[in-house]
Image (spheres, helix red, strand yellow):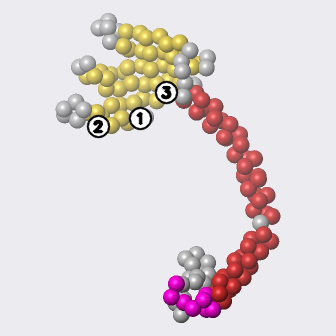
Amino acid sequence: MIDDKTTHLNLPKPHVNNLLSEDVERLRQGLDLIDSALHQISQSSTQPIADLQNEVARLNPLVEQLKTLSQTALFIPESTQVTRNAAGEISTVTEVIDGQSRITEILQRDDDRVVQYAITYLGQTTTYTINRNAGGDITGITSS
């Protein structure tokens, strides 16, 4: 008889090379073990469910905040204003999103390429630096 077992609960499994009479008994043992495990889970599940409900209640306000942020992140500006420097290059882009200004400011250029810019939105400013290789291709963007 081949004594196959399941990976996690080590339950007996039937095998094609076993006699049917052997596997029927193995299946009966496996069902009894499953029944016992499910009974233990049902007896001890009251507290974990209450803990889960408390955790869901605690996380709901955070989920609502994330929904608001995701709606803002996927914005369509109500208006956009572009400011140019003396050379005619874009220096600032101001967008109004849900009544709040989002300002993108070009901080540094190298030839005609933007090297560094900053975005200010909802009171926070993040500065981005565009990294390039010797050929001028963008290799990455870092933020601070």
Secondary structure under tag 2 reads: strand
Measuring 39% from the left and 30% from the top, which residue is drawn there?
128
Q: What span is in magenta? A: 16-23
Marks 1 and 2 close (CB-CB < 8 Å):
no
Above or below, comparing residue 16 to residue 142 in the picture:
below
**Distance from Cα at disc 1 to Cα at disc 3:** 10 Å
Q: Which residue is mark 1?
A: 143
The answer to which quarter of the image holds residue 60 is top right
Q: Are marks 3 and 2 in contact (CB under 8 Å)?
A: no
Q: Amino acid at mark 2?
A: Thr
**Image side of residue 126 versus residue 101, left or right:** left
Q: Residue at horizontal 39%, vertical 24%?
A: 117
Please state, as top left, top right, bottom left or bottom right, where the C terminus lies in the image. top left
Q: Is residue 60 magenta?
A: no
Q: Residue at x 58, y 82 (%)?
A: 13
Residue annotated with mark 3 = 125
Q: Nearer the viewer, mark 3 or mark 2?
A: 2
Q: Secondary structure at mark 1?
A: strand
Look at 75% across and 47% down and name the residue there.
57
How many residues crowd mark 2 within 10 Å: few (<14), some (14–19), many (20+)?
Answer: few
Q: Around disc 1, counting alpha carbons within 10 Å, would you say few (fewer than 14), some (14 to 19), or many (20 or more)?
A: few
Return the disc, 3 or 2, that comes first in the chain's sequence.
Answer: 3
**From the viewer's perspective, is 15 left or right of 136?**
right
Q: Callout 1, which amino acid?
A: Ser
Tell me, yes or no, whether the two marked residues, 1 and 3, touch with CB atoms within 8 Å: no
Q: Which residue is mark 2?
A: 139
Q: Position of residue 78 (x, y in %)?
A: 56, 15
Q: Position of residue 5 (x, y in %)?
A: 56, 82
Residue 63 makes an appearance in the image: yes
Q: In front: mark 1 or mark 2?
A: 2
